[in-house]
Amino acid sequence: MKKVNLGIIGCGAVVQSYHLPASKFARNINILIIIDKNIQLAKKICQRYDIPYFSDDYHKIFNFVDGVLIALPNNLHALVSMDFLKRGIPVLCEKPIANNIEGCEDFIKNKSRICYPPYNWTNTSFL
């Protein structure tokens, strides 16, 4: 079985405490790259988890990943998710998808032009 090359966008406490430790048990996932505006933190995490690449710009990875985990501040979830979804790249996004109802409605309207739906891994008050 081919492994899924996954990019992780953001490397805060949840990624460090939960996602990355759990990824050791996922046999069909290869975490290819960590993206964070704090490039030194991204580099440190890559070294700790033997992840080959790091960057501070998620725009550089569109052609290299099969999917992404969005683990950014809430106000960036919709914007960054849409950038990947519009390119047909599946997204696993932390909650919430957007900060308000209008943001969720905009997300849903744009979704009609997208092949892959977003996946929100926990219940939220907005979506």
Image (tube, rainbow, N blue to C red):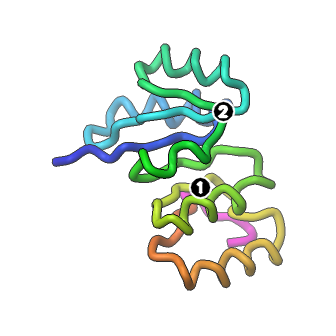
Q: Nearer the viewer, residue 41 or 101?
A: 41
Above-or-below relation of 80 to 34? below
Residue 96 appears in the figure:
no
Which of the 4 quarters of the picture holds residue 36?
Answer: top right
| Mark-to-mark CA distance, 1 and 2 | 19 Å
Q: Which residue is mark 2?
A: 56
Locate residue 87, reporting x and y percent: 51, 64
Q: Residue placed at 57% from the left, 62% from the top?
A: 120
Q: Which mark is residue 93?
A: 1
Q: Nearer the viewer, residue 52 or 119?
A: 52
* Residue type, numbered disc 2: Asp
Mark 1 or mark 2, whichever is nearer to me: 2
* Residue type, numbered disc 1: Cys
Identify the magenta region.
121-127
Q: Secondary structure at mark 2?
A: loop
Locate residue 108, reporting x and y percent: 65, 80
Q: Residue placed at 47% from the left, 27% from the top?
A: 53
**Left or right of 101: which side holds 96?**
left
Above-or-below relation of 5 to 77? above
